[in-house]
Amino acid sequence: MANLVKIKVDGQTVEVEKGKNLIDALATVGIYIPHFCYHPALGFDGNCRLCLVEIEGARGPQIACNTVVQEDMEVYLERESSKNLRRRTLEFTLINHPLDCPICDQAGECKLQDYYMELGPYESRMDYDKKVPKGKKFDFGCNVVHDQERCVLCARCVRFLRQYTKTAELGITNRGELARVTTFPDKPINNRYAMNIVDICPVGAMTSSDFRFRQRVWFMQTANSVCHGCSKGCSIFVDHNQEKYKEDKVYRFRPRPNDKINGHFMCDAGRLSYQRENENRLKSAKIAGSPESTASVVAAAARILAAADGSVFFVVSPSWTTEQMYSAKKLAAHYHGKISGYSTGTAVEGDADGILIQDDKAANRASLELLGISQDKAHFTRYLRESEVIVLLGSDILAGRSDEQVQELRQELEGKKVLLVDSHLTESSRIADMLLPCASFTEYAGTLINCDGILQQIDAAVCNENGPVAAEVLMGELSGNAWNSDLAAIREELSGKVAALADAPWSSFPASGVALDKKEAHA
């Protein structure tokens, strides 16, 4: 348990963690101190001076980012002399700042805007004609665009590239009013985490060329989710919006702070994977390439599964949720079939970088192991050969294979019925006799287990009327509704059947996830 000390803030006694700086300590009790250069993942720099506070007995004002809390400390934030410290510091910041909030991409989530509204000063004492001109729209590489005139020289971007990626592509040149953040000559930003610079920039100086001018942030809604880019399972925010007469659409993924998994950051590949949510979607059910109603295709598929009872092979995606994998296992048992989680194209050997990126690109492989679903290639090959009906549950069995291997697999499937349940069109959708669309991971709720054994929950974000249902619902329908496919019912059954999930806090799931014990599934 944290060692707590009592301090006074504007006469109010609060308990905060000993050893923390004032910014972090007071944030835990809902007291926010304005700051630019400080970031919890990068430490203090002390250059913006916006966090100046008055402390009883101290020799002059102190910067909160480098002031450690001590027992009986008395801090003043709200008295006028203390607020005036921050107000005058902010005035210096605003002297050369452009008045382009209406067109700034950061508007709505800009700390400079927030501080201005909180502190003022609301009337400038600066002659506009004397402002120092600065440049705009510098392409720094890796989707990072820099508007120099908005920069407050907090140096967060510079420190991120030196401390986190260790690539150091940015620096601050010159001094005083000539100081600028810039790249080194002919050396643009070139690393796999560059777009985190956009997140940590407190103003609109660093923007994303991918998101720039596409949406106003106050129009978007946000849901908690988990990145499906690799087995690390970084915690993310899904930002989406449904414009008038259009479908609800994902516009960006952002890292969601989680000290258990990804800290404050995520890789660029995972960040840009949001694009897949809007592209190449499987939107209608089909039989032999002809569109049909989902209900009619479900009914036809159920008849085929029943007729082939005992000779059905289910292949489930290693990126489906734990609840969906469990439903797939139940569906296989219902039709006395076999099930496999074997997959190709879900690993890139040597791609891991020791930071966040993993070789394994499957989001939930750990749940296959927990549920006892085989990933053995030999089992996959034998079951495929012996079965009359192949059901692909979000699994693209053609992915990651050479042309020769694809041809061999196609020959193996000749004369067999292939049913596919997926959210997207894949290579395997071309060989399927029946296609059934299901929701993608930004459209349903569920849980995933990452490579470190941490169970996380994803919330449904995108909601389109008459959109596809979640895969567990579809599998319940394929069974003839032989069980309750409601998410709560599946989770209750999981807690009773899987020892590691016996105490899972389904009704009050922590945002940071839960570390699971290494326990096997019940028989």
Image (cartoon, rainbow, N blue to C red):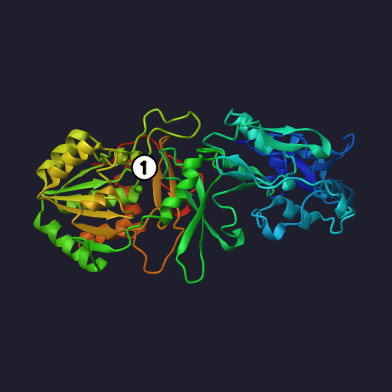
Q: Quadrant of residue 16?
A: top right
- Please state which of residues 188 and 373 is positioned toward the viewer in this rendering: 188
Quarter placement of the C terminus: top left
Quarter of the N terminus within the rendering: top right
For the image shown, how many numbered marks are present on the structure?
1
Left-right relation of 359 to 244? left
Residue furthest out toward the front = 186
Location of residue 69 by image quarter = top right
Q: Secondary structure at mark 1?
A: loop
Q: Percent x, y for residue 479?
A: 20, 59
Residue 344 percent location from the top left of the image: 28, 38
- Whether residue 332 is visible: yes
* Drawn side of residue 405 relative to residue 235, left or right: left
Mark 1 closeness class: few <14, some 14–19, many ≥20 residues within 10 Å:
many
> Is residue 495 toward the left or the right of residue 53 in the image?
left
Res 72 seen here: no
Amino acid carrying mark 1 in the image: Asn
What residue does disc 1 label? Answer: 364
Viewer-proximal residue among 386 and 490: 386
User: Is residue 408 shown above or below 126?
Assistant: above
Q: Residue at x 46, y 68 (%)?
A: 246
Q: Determine the residue positioned at 37% across, 65% down.
A: 467
Above/below status of 355 relative to 220? above
Residue 367: x, y in percent?
A: 33, 42
Q: Position of residue 326 (x, y in %)?
A: 29, 49
In the displayed structure image, the side of residue 55 where residue 489 appears, left or right: left
